[in-house]
Image (cartoon, rainbow, N blue to C red):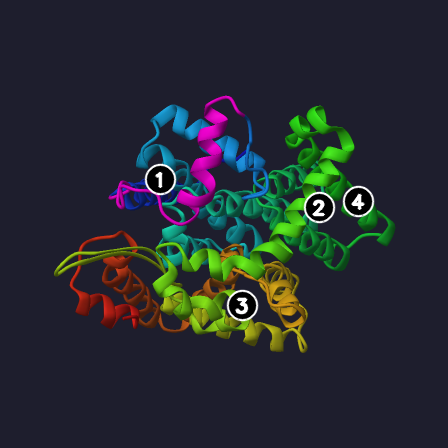
Amino acid sequence: MSRFPKSETIFLSFLVIFNLVLRIVRLDKPPVPYLNEKYFILPAVRDILKGLGDTQPITPPSPLGKLLFAFSIKMFGDNPLGWRILSVIFATISVIITYFLAKEITDNKTVAKIAAILLTFEFAFFVHSRSADPEALVITFVLLSLLFAWKIISNYQLRWTIASGLSLGLAIAIKPQAFLIIIAVILAILILLGTQFRKRIYLSFLILFISGCIYLVIYLPVFQKGGIMGFVTLHQAILQYHTQYWPQNYYQVMSQSEYGPRLPQFNKYLRQPITWLQNPKIVYFEQNTQDKKQVVLFTFHPAIFFPTTAIFLLALLLQFRKKDRKIIFLLLVASSAYFPYLLSSLYKPLTYPPYYFLSSLPPLIILLSFFLCWLWHKAKMLLVIYLIIVVVLFIIYYPLLTAIPIDYQYFQSISSLK
């Protein structure tokens, strides 16, 4: 294996250090658990550490995620560092994988560098990279699976098929919604791989089989305790909870929590994924004093989110005229984390948090970076100005992402919330 060029090694080293430092600073703020940390992850993880096993297999259905967070807390303690450092590490790895994914797909280091920089400063990704939540973990394995899937499409080797299946199995063991990515990967192989259709079917089945085996292995304790029927019954309960109980009762449950006063403001984002295109703003943590306010705000970076949406639509139109494998692949995998939620909401309103869209961001950012690289060759100064705007906006929003005490007026002017 050839060594990286020196400049690439320096860039990646700086990228790792910068991402770790950026996310570790103020990692203990807020000093108390919030949102999924408080209500789902930490209660389950603490029972695991007590030797009780997974006492809450339905909320969330993340057996591998909870085990990983249990390991983190055992290593670093039951404190903000122990809760959140794992997400920091996985998010940093995701940024690096995004670099290699962009480089593999476009065969262009400039595109890869731009994509890695943009993901580093993306608001929603940043917030979830500093929270004890499975989202940052599943994104890492999804990106790994996409990297291996593209290697299958561009230069088929059996090892990439096995690696993609393993990554996807780990992803769905952390978050079952990652099954949508499995469907996207299989479709990409069936459509884009230039080989006999029978071989494409075989590779698709192999990926599905390997990922399924990994998933079953993770649930081995359930089989040991309740057998096949125990496994089936558990998943029936998971399906019933997330498609019936929670959609019907979430408003009542959330109204009785500290999120009750804000619920009317972001209820529409949970019921109708089409409103995600408005760039939802949801307060994850909120603490008021007499003259200051501390918040952790979920929102997408506007200078990244809206351009990626425009590029996505433009790329869709271009594919009717010129079929490009790399563009089709990026469009397909990006769509898999959004359109199923949108379409299902038209049939039956459920509760879909906007962070379900996060795994779509890296492919969309790569699409945007592909365009920005073209801009770099045409007008370098415009790209420089754009990147400066991305960083400046991150600095402006930073207090709202990390619970820094701020004036009420500052919060209202930046977030448009009262």
The quadrant of the rendering that contains the N terminus is: top right
Tell me the tag on residue 28. none
Image coords of residue 377 (percent x, y): 41, 68
Q: Residues within 10 Å of mark 3 (few under 14, many from 20)?
A: some
Q: Amino acid at mark 1?
A: Ser
Looking at the image, is mark 4 or mark 2 earlier in the sequence? Answer: 4
Considering depth in this image, is 339 or 240 the residue closer to the camera?
240
43 drawn magenta: yes
* Above/below status of 334 relative to 155: below
Q: Quick check: 175 left or right of 187?
A: left
Query: In terms of depth relative to the viewer, which is nearer, 246 or 157?
Result: 246
Question: Which is nearer the N-term, disc 1 or disc 2?
Answer: 1
User: Which residue was labeled with disc 3?
Assistant: 271
Kindly state the secondary structure of the residue where label 3 is placed: helix
User: Which three-letter amino acid code belongs to the residue tagged 2?
Assistant: Gln
Q: Residues within 10 Å of mark 2 (few under 14, many from 20)?
A: few
**How far apart in space, not on screen, are marks 3 and 4 (Cα)?**
34 Å
Relative depth, front residue between 334 and 155: 334
| Mark 2 lies on residue | 236
**Which dot, 4 or 1, sits closer to the camera?**
4
**Dot 4 lies on which element?**
helix
Extent of the magenta region: 26-52
Q: For mark 4, what is the residue? A: 205
Q: Distance from label 4 to label 1 (Cα)? A: 38 Å
Q: Amino acid at mark 3?
A: Arg
Tag 1 secondary structure: helix
Q: Find the residue positioned furthest to the top.
A: 51
User: Residue 162, image x and y in percent?
Assistant: 70, 37
**Residue at image mark 1:** 13
